[in-house]
Image (tube, grey):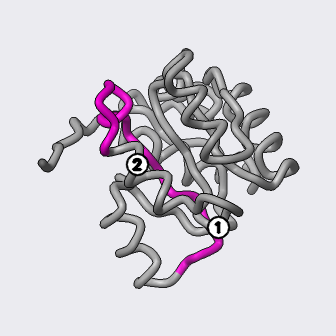
Amino acid sequence: MNPSHSVASRTTNRGKERSDHDNPALKDKRVLIVEDETDTREMLAHALKQRGAKPIEADSAKQAFRLLEKQGCDLVISDIGMPEVDGYTFMRKMRSMKSPARKLPAIALTAYAGEEDRKLAMQAGFDAHVPKPVTLTELVRVIGKVIGQPRKLTA
């Protein structure tokens, strides 16, 4: 078996291998990608689109809030280390919104990979903390997990 194939595939309950390209967790999901690094944002959008998602790109928290109000989404994936408004502040503000956006599942995809960073992300309101670099297979697994969980709101 090709090693790259084994990373991107898994076995279904019938014993057939299935690529993460077929992951139903992403099918037609509008995924807001909040990332100031253009190359990272575009690569992630392209990869998620290939897996059935409908990516929406924002290069800042300010732009992300405009997009949330204008068109909404099903999931947010946000960097932490962004200029002007960092990912922690973005998430705290998103969770305090008086709109359905406050209940959206959210993933911190970040180079801040320490345990303290994970705690800060979770305290800010992220549902998962994924350190960069990450394989797309792992990211798709985390997306499936957070999309399947109901969001418990505090306050």
Side of 51 relative to 4 (left or right): left
Where is residue 130 shown, x and y percent of the image? 52, 62
Instruction: For marks 1 and 2, give the CA distance.
Output: 16 Å
Identify the residue under disc 1: 81
Above or below 6: residue 83: below
Closest to the observer, 154 or 28? 154
129 over 69 or under it: above or below = below
At x 52% / y 27%, what residue is drawn?
68
Question: Neighbour class for label 1 at 10 Å: few (<14), some, many (≥20)?
Answer: some
**Is label 1 or label 2 in front?**
2
Q: Residues within 10 Å of mark 2 (few under 14, many from 20)?
A: some
Q: Which residue is drawn at 66% across and 57% down?
A: 135
The secondary element bearing badge 1 is classed as loop
Q: Which corner quadrant of the image does residue 94 belong to?
A: top left
The residue positioned 50% from the left and 84% from the top of the image is 114
Q: In this view, does 17 lie to the left or right of 141?
A: right
Please check the rendered image and state whether residue 29 is part of the magenta-colored stretch, yes or no. Answer: no
Residue type at numbered disc 2 = Lys
Q: Is residue 106 magenta?
A: yes
- Give the labeled residue for mark 2: 93
Magenta stretch in the rendered image: 96-113
Question: Could you tell me if the residues under marks 1 and 2 are in contact, i.e. CB atoms within 8 Å?
Answer: no
